[in-house]
Amino acid sequence: MRKLISIGIIVLAVVLLGIVLYLLFRGRVKPTLPPGTSGTPPPSTPFPQTPSVPSPTVVPTDDTFVIQTSEGGVVVRNFYKDNPPMYGSNVMLRDTSEYHIEYVRDNGQFLIALLAYTSEEAATARKKAEADLLQLLSVSRDTICSLDIWVSVPASYSETLAGTDYGLSFCPGAVAL
């Protein structure tokens, strides 16, 4: 009889442990990376990082500064004068309910997260983010297309839309939403 009670207690403990582990880990989802990338994105951004392109390591003080691209330098308005929040090498330029715009100082890349559940919401958010970024940088549409800009929807909003670089709608290679 004692042996049967011991077995019953062990089975009950294993079942309870299984339930606790299930409850702890059921809501965790791994981030989705675009095809052809490896590793995991940093926790502050849903985007993969690109190879390093030289950019300023100190905060510029002039009214403009140059962001280096594979095609040369692009002169942009000094958005650091707006005192944006900085998280390591990331500069949060905009944080709205529809989109986030970050600048990654380490590689000169802009990251736009469209906080949208549908392609219609994403298209609307992209238009607003594009206008905002053009104003932030004080550059033309042609000029902004030479910058490294990743536009995506986080998987936490839409797994269907996530993992694609949609680009700016008016730049070559943009993906329709």
Image: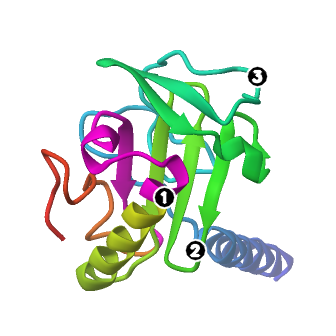
Q: Nearer the viewer, residue 12 or 125?
A: 125
Front label number (2 vs 3): 3
Where is the C terminus found, in terms of image quarters? bottom left
Which comes before the other along the chain, label 1 or label 2?
2
Q: Is residue 56 above or below residue 120?
A: above
Which comes before the other along the chain, label 1 or label 3?
3
Q: What SS does tag 2 mark? A: loop
Amino acid tagged 2: Gly
Mark 3 surroundings within 10 Å by alpha-carbon count, few (fewer than 14), some (14 through 19), many (20 or more): few
**Residue 137 at what x, y percent from top left?**
50, 47
Task: Judge whether residue 84 can be spotted in this image.
Answer: no
Tag count: 3
Report how far apart the C-alphas of labels 1 and 3 lie in the structure: 23 Å
Report how far apart the C-alphas of labels 1 and 2 lie in the structure: 39 Å
Mark 1 surroundings within 10 Å by alpha-carbon count, few (fewer than 14), some (14 through 19), many (20 or more): few
- List the residue tagged with mark 2: 27
Q: Which residues are magenta?
A: 133-156
**Residue 12 at what x, y percent from top left?**
73, 80
- List the residue tagged with mark 1: 135
Q: Is residue 122 above or below residue 69?
A: below
Q: What SS does tag 1 mark? A: helix
Q: Nearer the viewer, residue 48 or 21?
A: 48
- List the residue tagged with mark 3: 58
Q: Quadrant of residue 36?
A: top left
Mark 2 surroundings within 10 Å by alpha-carbon count, few (fewer than 14), some (14 through 19), many (20 or more): few
Q: Identify the residue at horizontal 34%, vertical 68% (top origin).
A: 126
Q: What SS does tag 3 mark? A: loop
Which comes before the other along the chain, label 2 or label 3?
2
Front label number (1 vs 3): 1
Compared across the picture, whether 147 is left or right of 106 comes to left
Amino acid tagged 3: Val
